[in-house]
Image: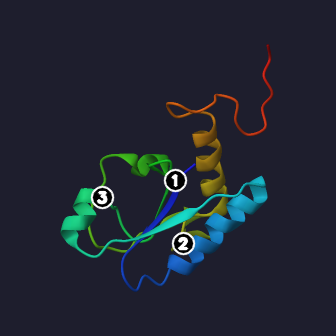
């Protein structure tokens, strides 16, 4: 599993996003390497399809399903809807859902039995 934290330089919500990724992994009992990707220009934001800072992706997909297509890309702050209103980082349950969704769809060349599932044969 590949988890990425994309951010603009100086993003004040980057540490909170990292804490929430780590909390989601801990809740699920998983370990993963988190790649931090600094997005430094409008051109790079367009190339990376970066909808704002911070952005969290699991296996290349944004943790917010609605943000996976059709959003403007660029150097801007990003907000998320949480239980208490607008937040500067994705809520832990949103990250957990994205990790679980990614776990149900093995990538090419990987064993289909993931997340502790036993073979039924």
Residue 85, by quadrant, is: bottom right
Q: Secondary structure at mark 2?
A: strand
Under circle 1, the secondary element is loop
The reply to whether the C-beta atoms of the residues labelled 1 and 2 are less than 8 Å apart is no
Question: Which residue: 52% across, 34% down?
Answer: 107
With respect to residue 102, does 50 lie above or below? below
Marking on residue 112: none
Q: Position of residue 33 (x, y in %)?
A: 59, 61
**Residue that appears at 36% across and 82% down:** 9
> What crowding class fits label 3: few (fewer than 14 Cα within 10 Å), some (14-19), or many (20 or more)?
few
For label 1, the residue is 63
Circles 3 and 2: CB atoms closer than 8 Å: no
- Residue at horizontal 18 percent and vertical 66 percent from the top: 43
**Residue 119, percent from left and from top:** 78, 22
Which quadrant is the C terminus positioned in?
A: top right
Measure the C-alpha gap from mark 1 to mark 2: 14 Å
The residue depicted at 45 percent of the width and 70 percent of the height is 54
Q: Which residue is mark 3?
A: 48
Q: CA distance from mark 3 to mark 1?
A: 15 Å
Q: CA distance from mark 3 to mark 2?
A: 23 Å
Q: Quadrant of residue 120?
A: top right
Image coords of residue 82 (percent x, y)? 60, 64
Looking at the rendered image, the disc whose residue lies closer to the viewer, 3 or 1, is 3
Which of the two discs, 1 and 2, labels the residue nearer the N terminus? 1
Q: Which mark is residue 87?
A: 2
N-terminal of the pair, mark 3 or mark 1, is 3
Dot 1, crowdedness within 10 Å: few (<14), some or many (≥20)?
many
Q: Earlier in the sequence, mark 3 or mark 2?
A: 3
> Observer-nearest residue: 46 or 86?
46
């Amino acid at each position: 599993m590949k988890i990425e934290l994309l951010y603009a330089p100086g993003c004040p919500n980057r540490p909170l996003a990292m804490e929430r990724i780590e909390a989601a992994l801990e809740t699920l009992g998983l370990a993963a390497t988190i790649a931090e990707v600094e997005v430094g220009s409008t051109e790079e934001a367009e190339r990376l399809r970066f909808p704002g800072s911070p952005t969290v992706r699991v296996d290349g997909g944004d943790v917010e399903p609605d943000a996976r297509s059709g959003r403007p890309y660029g150097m801007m702050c990003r907000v998320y809807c949480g239980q208490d209103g607008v937040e500067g980082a994705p809520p832990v349950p949103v990250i957990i859902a994205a990790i679980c969704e990614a776990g149900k769809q093995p990538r090419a060349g990987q064993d289909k039995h993931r997340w502790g599932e036993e073979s039924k044969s």
